[in-house]
Image (spheres, grey):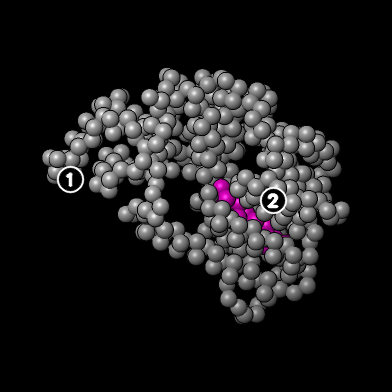
Amino acid sequence: MSHRNDALRAARIKAGWRTMEAAAAALQTYGQRFLDDPHFTVSARTWRRWEGNAPGWPPEETGTVLHEALGRWPEDLGFTTPAGWIRPEAHSEEDVKRRTFVSVTAAALMPGPVGSQHVDPALIDYFQQQLEGHYRADMFLGPHDLIGTVSAQYQLIDKLVRSAKGETRRGLLRVGAAYAALVGWLYQDAGDLGASTFWRGITQEIAARSRDPHLVGYSLVNLAQVRTDLSDGHGVIDLCEAALGDDRLFPKVRIMAMQQQAHGASLTGDRTAVDRLIDTAYGLLSRVDDDLPWGNACRRTPGYLEVQRATCYGRLGLGREAESLWSQVLDAVPATARRDRGVYLARHATAAAGAREPERAVEIVREAAVIAAETRSARMIRELSTLERAMRPWHDAPVGRDLAEILAPVNEGS
């Protein structure tokens, strides 16, 4: 029988149960003690079914024993979750998540009016300098530690906007849109696309109020990023074409829109469009000379456009071409860009698997797994899940077992 439930298999190996027969016996012994029930049984045949193509769903008490023995609930172990099932701890988890979301989004929905106050124009520079610091911190810390800080500063900016006049007000609106975009990105990196979409909407609203065409274009690209994560290629293309329809855009914003549209093209299987868009964006790089504090990845990230091309190639299934590009790109990525490096390594490993080089994929992913466990970036964990799928042809081989061992700390904490 071919093993297909890799999540349960990885948990079994991590627990030290080298065979399915040993796992069934160990779980039965554990369950009899935990439940104080000598009649609790788990047969080797049952365990083999669990690791097969159709693992089904275990009885409630068996699911509880699995959780106690392996530290994970059945839906995290590859079982087919029945409709309407809610694990015992889920209500409290959702309550905490909802309270956090309400607290943070309150920063964007602060009721007014507020008391009038003098707003010094120098505050615009202050918030811009803080923004650059947040971008740097994001590279080191990941999303979870920054969401509260950045959204609180957005709340202060929104309060000041309500009192500011003239150019000061417009300047604060522009920097406020950049802060909202960063909160949206942080939520996207944390894997909460609902909250990210909310903040992307706030970004678009503030950009429109600022009357800044570059920010409006930037806000559309932000929305397209979420559509990319939703695998909606046509939605990505629609939004990027809308942004590029404004001839006033700075080269930097046009580059952002073109590279994001290339991602949309890769989702629709259009390699020709991917190369055309990336190549056209290359022609604009030398013209990027604005002093805007946001959207500077094309200047800050080494090999920025080749990163996008390699990602698109991987999505298109062009394993060897993607693997070759990643080998070149990663040499230029500094250690300080830790989370980005982790994402790129995971994509590189997937490309190596697609090129039928599983041993190289496993060697590449070792560093990415360490970074993913530290930063808890949902984006990186999603890339590692893609790698696991690409490595399925070798899941029974020694290299497959090595991968399961390497990713066990990530899967355990996700």
Residue 93 is left or right of residue 164, and the answer is: left
Which residue corresponds to mark 2? 235
306 lies above or below 119: above
Mark-to-mark CA distance, 2 and 1: 51 Å
Query: What x and y, as percent, mark residue 19?
Result: 30, 24
Q: Which residues are magenta?
A: 174-189
Give the amino acid at mark 2: Gly
| Three-letter residue code for mark 1 | Leu
Q: Residue at x 63, y 50 (%)?
A: 226
| Residue 78 place in picture, x, y as percent | 40, 39
What residue is pinned by disc 1? Answer: 35
Residue 178 among magenta residues: yes
Which mark, by number, is residue 222? Answer: none
Q: Secondary structure at mark 2?
A: helix
Residue 408, image quadrant: top left
Q: Residue at x 39, y 55 (%)?
A: 84
Q: Quadrant of the N terminus?
A: top left
